[in-house]
Image: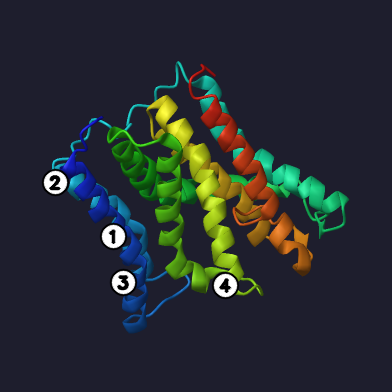
Amino acid sequence: MKVIDKKTLSNIIVFSLIVLSCGWIGRLVDLKATTDASGSLGQLIWIVSPLLAMVILRTFRGDGWKDLGIKPKIKNNIFLYLISIVFLPISALIIVLVGHNFKLMDASNLSPAFLTVFAAALLPSFIKNIFEEFAWRGYLTPKLFSLGYNRLLIHIYVGVIWSAWHIPYLLIQTDTTEGMITFIPRVMIGLIVQSIVYGEIRLRTNSVWPAVIMHTIGNAFVDSLILHKYLNIQTEFNYLVTPSPEGVLAILIAAITGIWLYKKRGSKL
């Protein structure tokens, strides 16, 4: 039986506690400070804290930098990089086709102009996801893996922490008529199953960049569809066919893809 590295485990617990609390601390800061269209000090604390915690733990708490996954390692992982690029856009397009054809949404507003909106969203999404992915897949995933835990349990744990980190600002940023008592658990399930996809590709490539790419393209693509009103989803079916992670169809597609990747972990893709 492998001996658990107590220092690494302790650092993982510290990291988890920091990221679970930083959003609520940010919300408290926002109660005292003003918020404008460009964001708030509290949101900055929320976004930056996971990456800052990772840097501190790696630099001053003995975690080191060897397993950060900073090298792209594209040469032997082209197919996995391709999955990272197309997975979330294809998932969204499948959902849009199903929703539109079954009259659950109206996607007739989609036009070539969407590509311009999507392209413009890529750079801000990339910057934001450097902060996220270098924390979740650049730190938490490889550190748990180094302790010898089951891969699937690692992805589930990362997904729980990742999704719970979203909750403080999810409560105020989400435009939905659905009650949070059903919405938040579905968001958490959606991010947990996506974490299997992200995590398997991260561990198999030994690089954080596929996760950054996937998250960047996924956010830019899905957010552009929703925020720019290219989709008109019937309210009663929003839980089913929204292309966001909390949509039931999105959860199903991510779960199938994640389990497929997990079962293929011993083969070369």
Q: Do the residues labelled 2 and 1 touch (CB within 8 Å)?
A: no
Element at label 4: helix
* Contact, mark 3 vs mark 4 (Cβ under 8 Å): no
3D distance between C-alphas at marks 2 and 1: 15 Å
Picture disc at residue 17: 1
* Identity of the residue furthest to the front in this view: 1
- Going by the numbered disc 2, the residue's amino acid type is Arg
Residues under labels 2 and 3: Cα distance?
23 Å
Image location of residue 55, percent across then percent down: 22, 47
Residue 61 seen anywhere in this rendered image of the structure: yes
Residue beneath disc 3: 25
Q: Which of 175 and 153 is in front in this view?
A: 153
Which numbered disc flags the more N-terminal residue, 4 or 2? 2
Q: Disc 3 and disc 4: Cα gap in Å?
A: 22 Å
**Tag 4 residue:** 181
Q: Residue 83 carries which label?
A: none
**Residue that numbered label 2 is attached to:** 61
Image coordinates for residue 229, horizontal then vertical, percent: 71, 61
Question: Where does residue 241 sit, x and y in percent of width and height?
Answer: 73, 55
